[in-house]
Image: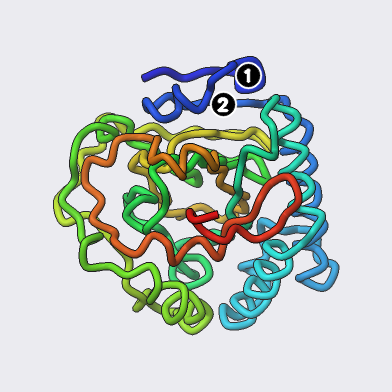
Amino acid sequence: MNLYLNQLQSKVDFKSSIYAGDIYLNTNLQATHDLCRFAKQSITAAFDGETDHQALHTMMPVTEFVERVTALKRQFTNCLDVKEMIHKFALEIGIDPAEYLFDVPRIRVVPNYNYLHAGVSYAYKPHRDTWYGNADCQINTWMPVYTITPDQTMMINPGYFSTPVKNSSVDWSLADWINVQRPLAKTNVTEETRIHPVPQEDIQTSSEIRIAGNEGEVITFSGSHLHGTVANFTDKTRFSIDFRLIHLQDLLTGRGAPNVDSGAKDVEAGYKDLFHLNDFSQFQGVSQ
């Protein structure tokens, strides 16, 4: 597999290379920098005008932090401005929004691990998004809102792209996650009690990579890559943004990255979180 630098917008069939495991790093896209600037405005508003965002976890009890992050996430995910910036991202990299669906955008907030690592700031164990019931053709984007270091970022482990990992996805339910587990995020403070699909074997870290980017520098990769949260033991809260693109025809025809180990069964339960990128209407399922 390959790493492409600032070539996403000039690669005619970039999604084919993403399905093969290639990773793209783009540092100069206007839409992603706009997203991060908007995120900073949203964080300031959610925390009553405080602008020292990376120190927020030092300013309040963890229960207050959770309440404010919960409100921030809700506002960001449902904001029309954010969806319009994702549309702008598609145009900027040269793809037709009419051909794509997108998952609701998310802002992630990862403070010092000992302060909070569950619920709204869950530190994701190594996983593939397909274990969570996402499509084989899902294209992930991920960007930091502030400059980060390797001990604050997300890890990707390309060595496992074609190598199966024993995991619990066969016993996991996406419908239960959406209807029961996900809403419990703000009640998980001292520990994560919600059920996640996780590895059931030790993960070797020799092929793990950690990309430490600056504001708005975006990684684009297959949701089938093994990836996870790097536990943040620094004194700075990490903010990041991610959204997912799904090519509609590839979803309908089953094209995408190879499924080497996912046992998730109720993938259709996640269609309620998918929207058409051209007009933001809700996706109604594969029968349309």
State the image coordinates of residue 143 (x, y, percent, origin top left).
Answer: 61, 41
The residue at the point 75 percent across, 31 percent down is 91
According to the image, label 2 marks what residue? 25
Looking at the rendered structure, the kind of residue marked 1 is: Asn
**Residue 106 visible to an observer of this rendering:** no
Where is 60 relative to 254, above or below? below
Task: Return the disc, 1 or 2, that comes first in the chain's sequence.
Answer: 1
Q: Secondary structure at mark 1?
A: loop
For the N terminus, the image quarter is top left
Residue 136: assigned label: none
**Residue 167 visible to an observer of this rendering:** yes
User: Is residue 123 shown left or right of residue 212?
Assistant: left
Q: Residues within 10 Å of mark 2 (few under 14, many from 20)?
A: many
Residue 6: assigned label: 1
State the image coordinates of residue 119 (x, y, percent, origin top left).
Answer: 47, 73
Looking at the rendered structure, the kind of residue marked 2 is: Leu
CA separation in Å, label 1 and label 2: 6 Å
The residue at the point 38 percent across, 76 percent down is 176
User: Is residue 32 shown left or right of residue 285?
Assistant: right
The residue at the point 70 percent across, 58 percent down is 281
The residue at the point 40 percent across, 72 percent down is 175
State the image coordinates of residue 251 (x, y, percent, origin top left).
Answer: 46, 44
Residue at the far front: name it: 287
User: Is residue 127 shown left or right of residue 204?
Assistant: right
For the C terminus, the image quarter is bottom right
